Amino acid sequence: MTEPSPPTNGTVVFDEERGRVGEVMDQSGGRLQLRPVRGGREWDADPAHVRTATTAERVRATLAAVNAASRGGNG
């Protein structure tokens, strides 16, 4: 059985270790580099603990970022 390929750049994923939704920005040293939807500080994630985000997770993350921006936060 072959191992699944990591998600491509631009894919919105759910990091199960951190409980966060992020967009794949790059891959380095066997880790994925993710950033919050609509921008923010990147973090590294283990591809073994990342899956494609559901529609509900993507919408929730986008709304949270929009709400934070409207309050002057960083989302």
Image (cartoon, grey):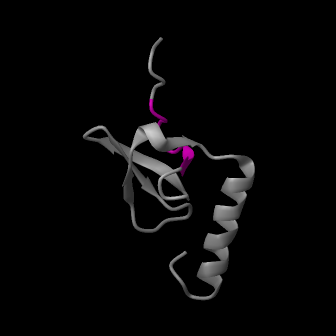
Q: Position of residue 71 (x, y in %)?
A: 62, 88
Residue in the picture at 42% in, 49% down: 25
Is residue 50 something one can see in this rendering?
A: yes
Q: Is residue 39 above or below residue 56?
A: below
Residue in the picture at 51% in, 62% down: 36
Q: Is residue 3 magenta?
A: no
Q: Which quarter of the figure has residue 6? A: top left
Quarter of the image with the C terminus is bottom right
Where does the magenta region start and end?
6-15
Q: Which quarter of the figure has residue 41? A: bottom left
In the image: residue 16, left or right of residue 62: left
Is residue 9 something one can see in this rendering?
A: no
Q: Position of residue 44 (x, y in %)?
A: 36, 53
Q: Is residue 13 magenta?
A: yes
- Majority secondary structure in the magenta region: loop
Q: Residue furthest top?
A: 1
Q: Position of residue 55 (x, y in %)?
A: 73, 49
Residue in the picture at 65% in, 71% down: 64
Q: Which quarter of the figure has residue 26? A: top left
Residue in the picture at 55% in, 58% down: 19
Q: Is residue 45 above or below residue 6?
A: below
Q: How many marks?
A: 0
Q: Residue furthest front?
A: 17
Q: Residue furthest bottom?
A: 71
